[in-house]
Image (cartoon, grey):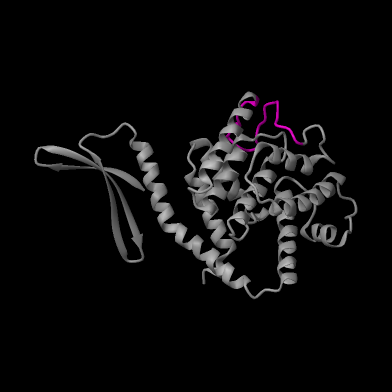
Amino acid sequence: MVTVARKRIGTRDYYYLQHTIRRGAKVSKKEVYLGPRLPRDVEARKRQLQLDLFREQWLPRLDRIRKEVRHESKGIPSSLAAKRLQDFAVRFTYDTQRIEGSTLSLRETADLLDRGITPANKPVQDVREAEAHEALFHEVLRYTKDLNRQIVLKWHRSLFLSTRPDIAGQFRRHGVRISGSRFVPPLPVEVEPLMRDFFAWYHRARDAMHPVERAALVHLKVVTVHPFGDGNGRVSRLLMNLVLKQARFPLLNIPYENRASYYRALERSQTRRDDLPFLRWFFRQYAKNHRHLLG
């Protein structure tokens, strides 16, 4: 935790931000000088210090993951690499759809996407959306340009054209609520300007921010704006993996079994207007997914 400390030197007071770091038996202290007066933006400075310390702790580990996966992939035949990607596509489609209420099991999803076997007695909507998601996943990963409004709307249309044509490929014009969450998404009139802000931020962040952090914030920002009538989580998780793929980092799947902690992290960041709770969850999930590369 970052705290404010006051030190008296002679007859004057001086203010600092302090953070105690414990690594095993070692304890160290990080200090940032604030000045002879407590600044008005002290809370913002505390959040920035927390973020800087968090990056210092995590970014080298994330870079190691990329280094190890690139080394590991050098000797893999292209056919095996394609199979691994398809296995990921199936699992990712299952989990992302299941999080949003799909009734298909992992086995049914694999039979459908790998063998063309349609599960019996399951909603047609679940089947069609799984098929559309898997096809879109591969399309998104082949994309090499910058994100923009047109491509995101196109992808949303591809995802829902066969099941929800009334909302496919368009930003919402109605209010929405997120079931079970204290966070209330923006009003419909705010969606267009907020998405313009998002794309402007994305272009600024492309070269200025670590790719894994950028992937996490792309997800968080899109799902917070909640620009669509449905599919916000699915689209944001696809965009998340697009960022990772373009930066040559391994992809991330968010398992259905982890949905409770995932929802809590999103809600904390959304209600507090603080990226750090979700970044903490995201980085840990990313490291957990790729722990075999960290030794």
- Return the x and y of residue 100 as percentages of the image width and height: 72, 45
- Return the x and y of residue 212 as percentages of the image width and height: 54, 53
Q: Nearer the viewer, residue 204 or 56?
A: 204
Residue 8 visible (yes or no): yes
Span colored in magenta:
169-188
Instruction: Examine the structure image and report whether residue 177 is included in the region drawn in magenta.
Output: yes
Pick out the residue farthest to the top.
189
Instruction: Examine the structure image and report whether residue 217 is included in the region drawn in magenta.
Output: no
Pick out the residue farthest to the bottom.
75
Q: Is residue 17 left or right of residue 211?
A: left
Residue at 72% from the left image edge and 70% from the top image edge: 78
How many marks the image carries: the answer is 0
Residue at 80% from the left image edge and 53% from the top image edge: 104
**Residue 22 falls in image quadrant:** bottom left
Residue at 80% from the left image edge and 57% from the top image edge: 109
Q: Is residue 137 left or right of residue 35?
A: right
**Residue 79 falls in image quadrant:** bottom right
- Return the x and y of residue 239 as percentages of the image width and height: 64, 47
